[in-house]
Image: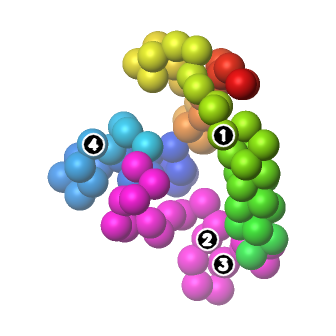
């Protein structure tokens, strides 16, 4: 079974694989499939996340984490990699 949670986590290929880096060169991922198995809803999903993040950051430009990044807790799952919570302050 393919585990998407392990995608892009190979330290031999990706420097600092456990850190979120929006400027990472290799941005391809497996979540939306490849080739003939490419998700038909992928463009809509990308547009939705772009609009959501733009709106959030535009409305709350002073969005800050309440805790240091090292204290964020990850959900235990073999299927995906996600945070349990993202505590932030809105100013």
Question: Which residue bears the numbered disc 3?
Answer: 37
Between marks 3 and 4 in the image, the one whose residue lies nearer the viewer: 4
Looking at the image, residue 66 lies above or below residue 27: above
Assess disc 1: are there few (<14), some (14-19) or many (≥20) residues with their C-alpha within 10 Å of its C-alpha: few
Disc on the earlier residue, 3 or 4: 4
From the viewer's perspective, tell me whether residue 45 is left or right of residue 37.
right
What numbered label is drawn on residue 86? none
Q: Residue at x 72, y 55 (%)?
A: 54
Residue 76 figure quarter: top right
Real-space CA distance between mark 2 and mark 3, rounded to the nearest whole angstrom: 5 Å
Pick whichever, 81 or 62, lies toward us.
Answer: 62
From the viewer's perspective, tell me whether residue 49 is left or right of residue 74.
right
Question: Which residue bears the numbered disc 2?
Answer: 33
Assess disc 2: are there few (<14), some (14-19) or many (≥20) residues with their C-alpha within 10 Å of its C-alpha: few
From which residue to which does the magenta span run? 21-42
Q: Residue at x 73, y 37 (%)?
A: 60
Between marks 2 and 4 in the image, the one whose residue lies nearer the viewer: 4
Q: Main secondary structure of the magenta part?
A: loop
Real-space CA distance between mark 1 and mark 4, rounded to the nearest whole angstrom: 27 Å
Question: Which residue bears the numbered disc 1?
Answer: 61
Q: Secondary structure at mark 4?
A: loop
Q: Residue at x 73, y 49 (%)?
A: 58
Question: What percent of the width, then of the height, locates residue 29?
Answer: 50, 64
Real-space CA distance between mark 2 and mark 4, rounded to the nearest whole angstrom: 24 Å
Question: Which residue bears the numbered disc 4?
Answer: 16
Pick whichever, 60 or 46, lies toward us.
Answer: 60
Q: Secondary structure at mark 1?
A: loop
Pointer 2 with pointer 3, Cβ within 8 A: yes
Q: Secondary structure at mark 2?
A: loop
């Amino acid at each position: 079974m393919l585990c998407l949670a392990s995608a892009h986590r190979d330290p031999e290929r990706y420097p600092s694989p456990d850190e979120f880096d929006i400027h990472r060169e290799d941005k391809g991922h497996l979540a939306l499939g490849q080739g003939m198995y490419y998700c038909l809803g992928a463009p809509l999903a990308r547009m939705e996340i772009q609009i959501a993040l733009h709106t959030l950051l535009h409305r709350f430009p002073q969005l800050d984490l309440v805790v240091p990044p090292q204290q964020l807790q990850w959900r235990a799952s073999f299927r995906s990699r996600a945070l349990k919570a993202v505590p932030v302050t809105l100013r």
